[in-house]
């Protein structure tokens, strides 16, 4: 996970980058496509997004976890979830879980590390970074121990090879029912 800090404006841009793939926007005209500064401050006030990591003068600074939280919020809202339902899903979510909820695509680093004695690492500490990619609306593959970065051809081949797994998950009732459009 990146140690980079973002201002509110930069955080909004980072969320837009995370949502660049496979994001059709919001169904409701009452929900913003992307969060602006005012929305981010409100989400922080109601506890949906963590408080800023630091401040420089009067400027709040945010990290990658904040971007993942906001991307997850927008993806869940796009599925039609009310803000209260989004809050329930995000409560206590790890960075890896946020990455899955945000449906972040190919080779986005996910912090799944643990600190000493198996407890959670200190904020901002990355102990084990792995690539992850989505193969379906409900399944994300996390690869631990890969020897190189994945390219689009790798992801396409792995996604095709995962078809029997997706069929088995559906047959066993381990995935949510597909919405009919």
Image (tube, grey):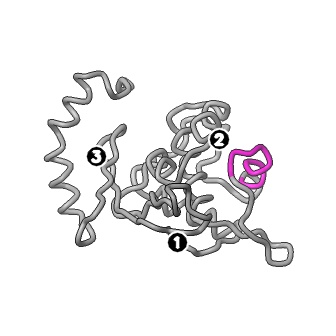
Q: Secondary structure at mark 3?
A: loop
- Residue located 78% across and 49% down the image: 42
Where is mark 2, residue-wise?
A: 31
Where is mark 1, residue-wise?
A: 2
Q: Which mark is residue 135?
A: 3
Q: Position of residue 69 (x, y in %)?
A: 59, 52
- Label 1 environment density (alpha carbons within 10 Å; few <14, some 14–19, many ≥20): few
Residue 166 as seen in the image, left or right of residue 6: left
The answer for how far apart the CA atoms under marks 3 and 2 are is: 27 Å
The C terminus, quarter of image: top left
Q: Position of residue 135 (x, y in %)?
A: 28, 46
Q: Is residue 163 above or below residue 148?
A: above
Ranked by sequence position, the earlier of labels 3 and 2 is: 2
Q: Name the dominant secondary structure of the magenta segment.
A: helix
From the viewer's side, name the closer residue of 54 and 81: 54
Q: Can the viewer see residue 149?
A: yes
């Amino acid at each position: 996970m990146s140690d980079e800090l973002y201002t509110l404006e930069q955080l909004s841009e980072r969320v837009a980058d995370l949502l660049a793939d496979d994001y059709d926007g919001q169904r409701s005209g009452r929900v913003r496509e992307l969060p602006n500064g005012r929305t981010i401050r409100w989400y922080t006030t109601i506890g949906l997004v963590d408080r800023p990591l630091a401040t420089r003068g009067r400027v709040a600074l945010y990290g990658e976890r904040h971007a993942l939280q906001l991307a997850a919020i927008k993806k869940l809202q796009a599925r039609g979830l009310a803000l209260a339902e989004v809050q329930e899903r995000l409560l206590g979510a790890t960075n890896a879980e946020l990455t899955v909820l945000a449906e972040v695509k190919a080779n986005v680093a996910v912090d799944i590390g643990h600190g000493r004695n198996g407890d959670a690492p200190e904020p901002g500490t990355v102990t084990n970074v792995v690539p992850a990619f989505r193969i379906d609306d409900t399944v994300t593959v996390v690869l631990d121990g890969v020897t190189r970065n994945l390219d689009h051809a790798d992801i396409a081949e792995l996604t095709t090879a995962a078809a029997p797994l997706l069929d088995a998950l559906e047959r066993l009732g381990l995935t949510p029912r597909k919405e009919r459009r």
